[in-house]
Amino acid sequence: MIVVTNRIKVKKGMAAAMAPRFTRPSGLDSMKGFVRVEVLLTQGLEEHDEMNVNMYWEEMTDFEAWRNSDDFKASHKRPAQTEDKQEESPMLGSEIFIYEVASVKERNS
């Protein structure tokens, strides 16, 4: 299993409002090898908000298929801008990290 983390910096006060966008129903739900997505909000930052969007995949090839899919492209497309509607993006930057899950311990029921 792999975990792909997208560490996203956004304008202060925006992370909590943006978080549900990553977990709403989408084409991701039917992708081969998709396990789950979770959004973590970093605590204690003063200058900006930060979200860590963790996506769990069975295999790296499954994640790569998602990255190359039309659903991925559609979900990352910015809304069309017009002269009267110039919305500034709340995004300040992002970085991708990929991890292989080496060991797991879960609570016994």
Image: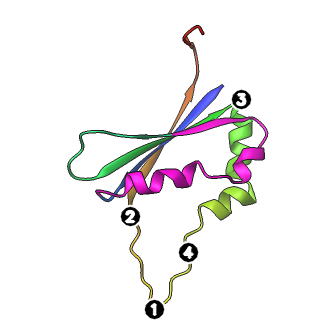
Q: CA distance from mark 1 to mark 2?
A: 19 Å
Question: In percent of the image, x 56 and y 50: which residue is there?
Answer: 22
Number of disc labels: 4
Does label 4 or label 3 sit earlier along the sequence?
A: 3
Q: Is residue 88 above or below residue 6?
A: below
Magenta residue check for 37:
yes
Q: Amino acid at mark 4?
A: Pro
Q: Are marks 2 and 3 in contact (CB under 8 Å)?
A: no
Q: Amino acid at mark 3?
A: Glu
Crowdedness near tag 3: few (<14), some (14–19) or many (≥20) residues, C-alpha within 10 Å: some
Q: What is the span of residues highlighted in magenta in the rendered image?
A: 12-38
As drawn, the label of residue 58 is 3
Q: Secondary structure at mark 3?
A: loop
Q: Amino acid at mark 2?
A: Pro
Q: Are marks 4 and 3 in contact (CB under 8 Å)?
A: no
Q: Is residue 2 left or right of residue 6?
A: right
As drawn, the label of residue 90 is 2
Asked which quadrant contains residue 63, the reply is top right
Q: CA distance from mark 4 to mark 3?
A: 31 Å
Magenta residue check for 21:
yes
For label 4, the residue is 79
Question: In percent of the image, x 52 and y 52: which residue is there?
Answer: 20
Q: Secondary structure at mark 2?
A: loop
